[in-house]
Amino acid sequence: MSLSQDKIAELIKTHPLIQSLVKLEEVSWFNPAIAPGNTAEGMTKVGLGPADIEDASARLTRFAAYIRKAFPETEASGGIIESVVRPIPKMQQALEERYGLKLKGKLWLKQDSHLPISGSIKARGGIYEVLKHAEDLALEAGLLKYEDDYAKLFSDEFRQFFSQYSIAVGSTGNLGLSIGIMSAKLGFKVSVHMSADAREWKKNKLRQCGVNVVEYQTDYSVAVANGREQAKSDPTCFFIDDENSRTLFLGYSVAGGRLKAQFAELGVKVDAEHPLFVYLPCGVGGGPGGVAFGLKNAYGDNVHCFFAEPTHSPCMILGVYTGLHEKICVQDLGIDNLTAADGLAVGRPSGFVGHAMQGLIDGYYTLKDEEMYQLLSLLDQSEGIRLEPSALAGMPGISRVLSNEEYLSRMGFTPEQLEHATHLVWATGGGMVPPEEMAKYLAQGQAQA
Ligand SMILES: *Cc1c(COP(=O)(O)O)cnc(C)c1O
């Protein structure tokens, strides 16, 4: 479904920012509907609450004994899939020089890029939804009880049981990687429908795990639609719906409470006098939406979340700004949805996330592919940390926020609060990029600098 030319001409008149999106300019949009102290009200619109996050967290705890056994790299964390958070002062300094702006507060990086098992933020939601499905099936069959030691799932008996069922998903790469690896490990038959953006090494890695990789020459929404269609014809097949899934969303949301515990341990204060700003790369919206929901649940009014998208795939900003959500896609405006940030190459946003989270996200911005490549190289040079292009999208956020007087004064931030603020870039992927691919990314960033 695409919008008529008349409707689009009308929209451009009422929503002038669309012209900048069409010209592929970098834009920042701070949602005027967000006001200080409106988190509680925003939370009531999500349709999910603290008990749902608790439930997801408890499920991951039950599965820890299984994860630890099935993926020995999680031994140190006792089977809990979590990433480190660390300050990046040298990058902060490099960004001050790059943007010619004093960047008050302290810049941190959340390294979901290096999450175990699949090396991206999808190791939260994607893996969680597969585990929940496995648990549902095993409980229903009377093979499992909540009180059991879930390590027993790592056995031929359970692999045999799960092999009667299949799982399907559409993906630009990382979601497929997470769901494919986890499903195959449990014993499921699994099909991953990969859009044209998906990197060859991700497909190869999945094939090595015994995953059925279905390739498309088209973008993400077509891969998802086809996956959904094929799954319909098979009653034993469970389709993981990245565009609508509450389960995926809740898997991501557990990150909020976990970050709060990490910051508390590190002595990083987040309260009214020490606001936290978080910058999340956004594709269809489930990952950043779920994490932001978890953060809002953990920190309330003291956390401020922002979504970042490529100029070629600004689907979430377009959906929220126009209020049309999943009824509009970037292609309706002639925007091509072609970007090197494969994790963010999505043309139509999740309607669920757009509607549910619009009262909780302070702002949205876009950045060019060249910017992501240059920041990729800059982060490597300054901090020795290597990420995939999508994961750099959060990096300009601090300068977009601190240079927007309208937003800062509307929210009533004092100079002291900004001095004491923490700015957190959510690094969403890159830990499993093969060295030869990473060398190409780095060369590209240097060539463009
Ligand atoms: C999937 C992904 C995102 C965004 O998540 P969505 O749920 O699609 O919004 C961001 N970065 C990377 C590296 C990803 O793989």
Image (cartoon, helix red, strand yellow):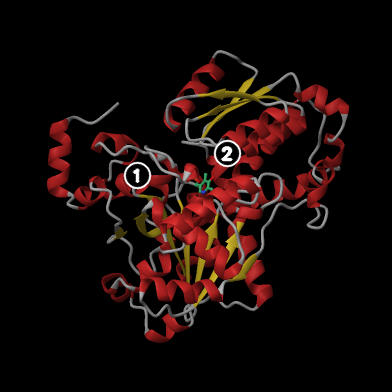
Amino acid carrying label 2: it is: Leu
Percent position of residue 333, x then y: 24, 38
Residue 312: mark:
1
Quarter of the image with the C terminus is bottom left
Q: Is mark 2 within 8 Å of ligand 1?
A: yes
Left or right side of 229 for 138: right
Percent position of residue 249, x then y: 54, 45
Front residue of 283/298: it is: 283
Q: Residue furthest top?
A: 233
Left or right side of 205 for 284: left
Q: Residue furthest bottom?
A: 416
Amino acid carrying label 1: it is: His
Q: Residue at x 76, y 25 (%)?
A: 162
- Quadrant in the rendering for residue 260: bottom right
* Crowd band around label 1 with a 10 angstrom C-alpha radius: few (<14), some (14–19), many (20+): many
Quarter of the image with the N terminus is top left
Front residue of 33/121: it is: 121
In the rendered image, which residue does mark 2 sit on? 175
Q: Residue at x 39, y 46 (%)?
A: 354
- Quadrant in the rendering for residue 412: bottom left
Q: Is residue 90 visible?
A: yes
Q: CA distance from mark 2 to mark 1?
A: 20 Å
Percent position of residue 181, x then y: 69, 35
Left or right side of 369 for 376: right
Eye-nearest disc, 2 or 1: 1
Front residue of 284/255: it is: 284
Percent position of residue 383, x then y: 59, 69
Residue 324: mark:
none
* Crowd band around label 2 with a 10 angstrom C-alpha radius: few (<14), some (14–19), many (20+): many
